[in-house]
Image (cartoon, rainbow, N blue to C red):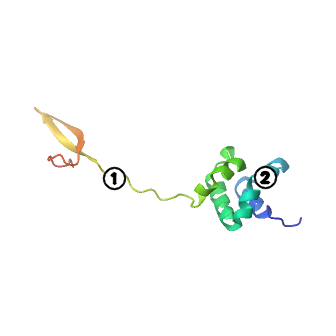
């Protein structure tokens, strides 16, 4: 079989999901043709990331084409959430409980 522009995309698809049927290959070609024409290397990288991270039951070449720019990295790093609260001990008689308070509360953080 002669190599065409779609061959690398099909090879990536096969690696994660198995041999695509004729209909799947046609849908893939329609969805990826314009993206490949814009930037083949970036599209292949993002296609690989998409296929690796997406379970087959959620796979859609059309959906990938809509959001392909988001697949630049497999799992983009997210900043850690900023700590705004802390846990402190609150005593009532002989009972003690933990309550969540803002960081600027003067009581020491529970250990």
Q: Is residue 59 above or below residue 42?
A: above
Q: Residue at x 68, y 52 (%)?
A: 65
Please tell me the numbered disc located at residue 20: none
User: Which residue was labeled with disc 1?
Assistant: 82
The answer to whether residue 109 of the structure is visible from this angle is yes
Q: Indicate the quadrant containing the N terminus: top left, top right, bottom left or bottom right.
A: bottom right
Q: Secondary structure at mark 1?
A: loop
Residue 24 in picture, x, y percent from top left: 79, 49
Farthest-out residue, right: 1
Near-viewer residue (51 or 67)? 67
The answer to whether residue 19 of the structure is visible from this angle is no
Q: Is residue 23 left or right of residue 60?
A: right
Residue 64 in picture, x, y percent from top left: 67, 51
Q: Residue at x 61, y 57 (%)?
A: 69
Residue 8 in picture, x, y percent from top left: 76, 64
Residue 48 in picture, x, y percent from top left: 66, 60
Near-viewer residue (38 or 99)? 38
Q: Residue at x 76, y 61 (%)?
A: 11
Q: Is residue 59 left or right of residue 83?
A: right
User: Which residue was labeled with disc 2?
Assistant: 30
Q: Secondary structure at mark 2?
A: helix
């Amino acid at each position: 079989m002669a190599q065409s522009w779609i061959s690398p995309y099909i090879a990536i698809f096969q690696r994660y999901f198995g041999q695509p049927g004729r209909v799947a290959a046609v849908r893939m070609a329609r969805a990826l043709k314009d993206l490949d024409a814009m930037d083949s290397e970036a599209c292949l990288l993002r296609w690989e990331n998409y296929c690796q991270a997406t379970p087959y039951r959620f796979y859609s070449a059309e959906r990938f084409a809509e959001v392909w720019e988001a697949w630049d990295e497999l799992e983009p790093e997210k900043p850690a959430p900023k700590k705004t609260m802390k846990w402190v001990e609150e005593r009532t008689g002989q009972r003690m409980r933990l309550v969540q308070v803002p960081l600027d509360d003067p009581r020491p953080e529970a250990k």
